[in-house]
Image: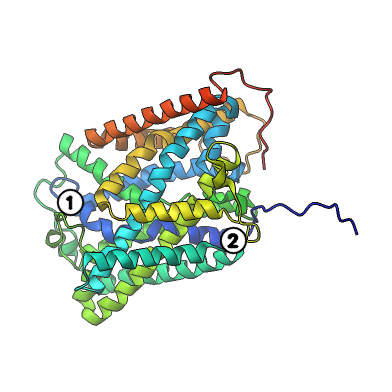
Amino acid sequence: MNHDTPAPQPHLIRRFGLFQATALNMSNMIGIGPFITIPALMSAVNGGGPQCMLGWVVALLITLPDGLIWAELGAAMPRAGGTYTYLREGFGPHTWGRLMAFLFIWQFILSGPMEIGSGFIGLKQYLSFLWGDASPATLHWVILGLGLLLLVLLYRQIGSIGKITVSLWAGTMLTVAAVIFSGAGHFDAKIAFDFPPGAFDFSLGFVMGLGAAARIGVYDYLGYYDICYIGEEVRDPGRVIPRSILLSLVAVAAIYLAMNLAIIGVVPWRTFTPVPDSGPAPIASIFMEKIWGKGTATVFTVMILWTAFASIFALTLGYSRVPYAAARDGYFFSVFSRLHPTKHFPHVSLVFIVVLSLIFSFVSLTTLIDALITMRILVQFVGQAGAVILLRRLQPDRALPFKMWLYPLPALLALAGWMFLFWTTDTPLKLGSFVALALGVALFLIWSWRTRRWPFAQPGPAASTPRP
């Protein structure tokens, strides 16, 4: 026996197939989002009303072409980290790609936990319906307990996580089916299509309101790309990643349309708009109570809590891989590059993401949604639209298992859509995004100067980056 053989190093394992990948994306996308954002959505355009559903349509017209960008990049570079890898490779790993990757991690360590924190806020909203006399402090303690449960469930090998993901997805599908079929049997078109006067009057206010509604819609669709963050743990990624992204988008778009119509066809939109300062009403529980009574609404609320937890689970699983991937390649603190020695998952990164998400659960929902969408547009979404074009031009020999249809039209459409959302954002949030971006650039330059890397030193030999 050779006693000098080194022990195998911990590494990520490819276990996720198409079913698990699609379940992961859909669990992330549906989650608590539509159950807490319908009131805000229905208030966005021309004083509120059914015309606000145009926001979800506009959001779909942005996310579908953007999904093709994710599909091409994810299939070509199925590695942990997703956007981090795409920006680094697309803009050049030794030059501008270093800056873009750094800026992405810089905004992601805030926007990622913000998104997960919004799920915890939704959990509190529906827990208040289930437990009406609970104090805010009690609800906070319950959320902290659920955060600990999340950590326990994810603190394991990816193979068993795939089974947990499918189980949570099944609960999510049961919940949305209950809403759709309950609404179908009690749908009233006069209630659903109660348009206010001037609902479609075109003006600057209409355009700005449509942008606000579309940002809410994008928030509800977020997660169609979640599988890309664990690309290094996907079987046959060239086929599975693109299909799971497109299947998730189409399926969830149909679910959202049916679910929204079901709710506003039973509960008049004027009764839950505008949204009070205390936050959006638990509209889905009110909907079920109106149809079936308090007992059934209570059972259904438990199902919504299950759905919300499934979304938080899916988000945390994917997002915990991003700081790990950056640290592994030398773009973040090295402690985040550690894999668990026996279970082979990034345990330090996981704990960090969960803790920061719980902290953000104490912030208001609308603030988190606006902040995270605005922060991501400039670096992540706009950056990826540029990266997919640059990769085609500068690396024509790179293998592309999936090529977006009608290239480059989807990338240009997605780019135009993201810029529309940014333009219609409130000025303070836009200024805040630019300040955060400028601070990130300053930190990058200081870090690069101290380590004598680009742009303060000549790039080393053009060593090729490993391509999976």
Is residue 436 in view?
Answer: yes
In the figure, 436 relative to 224: above or below? above
| Tag 1–tag 2 contact (CB < 8 Å) | no
Is residue 385 in view?
Answer: no
Q: In which quadrant of the rendered image does the C terminus lie?
A: top right
349 or 294: which is nearer to us?
349
Q: Quadrant of residue 330?
A: top right
Circle 1 sits in a helix, a strand or a loop, which is it? loop
- Colouring used for the render: rainbow
- Residue type, mark 1 in image: Ser
Would residue 219 appear left or right of 348 to someone viewing this image? Answer: left
Residue drawn 21% across the image and 38% down it:
208
Q: Residue 158's mark? A: 2
139 or 214: which is nearer to us?
139
Residue drawn 59% across the image and 26% down it:
94
Residue furthest right as drawn: 1
* CA–CA distance in space, label 1 to label 2: 41 Å
Where residue 110 sits: x, y (%)?
Answer: 39, 44
Marks 1, 2: nearer the viewer: 2
Where residue 166 sits: x, y (%)?
Answer: 51, 67
Q: In which quadrant of the rendered image does the N terminus lie?
A: bottom right
Mark 1 or mark 2: whose residue is earlier in sequence = 1
Residue underneath mark 1 = 43
Residue drawn 12% across the image and 48% down it:
47
